[in-house]
Amino acid sequence: MLRFFADENFNGDIVRGLRLRDPGFEIVRVQDTEVVGAEDPVLLAWAARQNRILLTHDRATMPDFAYQRVARGEGMLGVFVVSDRMLVGQAIEELLLVAGASQSDEWAGRVFYLPL
């Protein structure tokens, strides 16, 4: 199963909905870690060390930092940029689908945008 890391501005309703729909859904919020308040590169490094895919709504800076990390040869399991205009239910459904139908190595070193 995929493991996720939600950044600071990620919609908490999506996180709660994922946990309600699947109590075993592997997600950690940045607010529950020692990197709360950290810059994007620190969050990406933490997610990589913990073997987690980063979830964000940040289209402006996070993808650039992720690609810079990959260009330097530093690993990461991926970044999912979830549109903040997506309905909460749709975001939950798509994340559950992706988590249930794929392996983490399929997303490694890449940035994906939801909706798919």
Image (cartoon, helix red, strand yellow):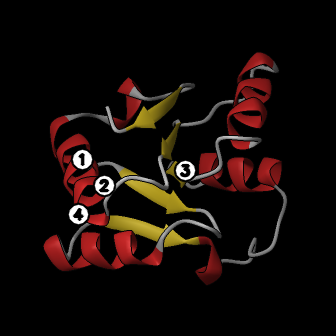
Cβ–Cβ under 8 Å for marks 2 and 4: yes
Nearer the viewer's eye, disc 4 or disc 1? 4
Cβ–Cβ under 8 Å for marks 2 and 1: yes
Which residue carries the number 3 mark? 54
Mark with earlier residue (3, 2): 3
Residue 56 placement, left or right of 4: right
Question: Residue at position x 57%, y 55% from top?
Answer: 50
Query: Extreme front residue here?
Result: 85
Image quadrant where residue 64 sits: top right
Which residue carries the number 1 mark? 94
Cβ–Cβ under 8 Å for marks 4 and 1: no
Numbered disc 1: secondary structure? helix
Q: In the image, what residue type sits under mark 1?
A: Glu
Is residue 105 placed above or below 84 in the rendered structure? above
Numbered disc 3: secondary structure? strand
Mark with earlier residue (4, 1): 4
Tell me if mark 2 has few (under 14), some (14-19) or many (20+) residues whose alpha carbon lies within 10 angstroms of its own.
many
Q: Marks 4 and 1, Cα distance to the nearest angstrom?
A: 9 Å
Which residue carries the number 4 mark? 89
**Residue 97 x/y as whole percent:** 17, 45
The disc label shown at residue 91, or none: 2
Q: Marks 3 and 1, Cα distance to the nearest angstrom?
A: 15 Å
Nearer the viewer's eye, disc 3 or disc 2? 2
Q: In the image, what residue type sits under mark 2?
A: Ala
Q: In the image, what residue type sits under mark 3?
A: Leu
Question: Residue at position x 53%, y 63% from top?
Answer: 6
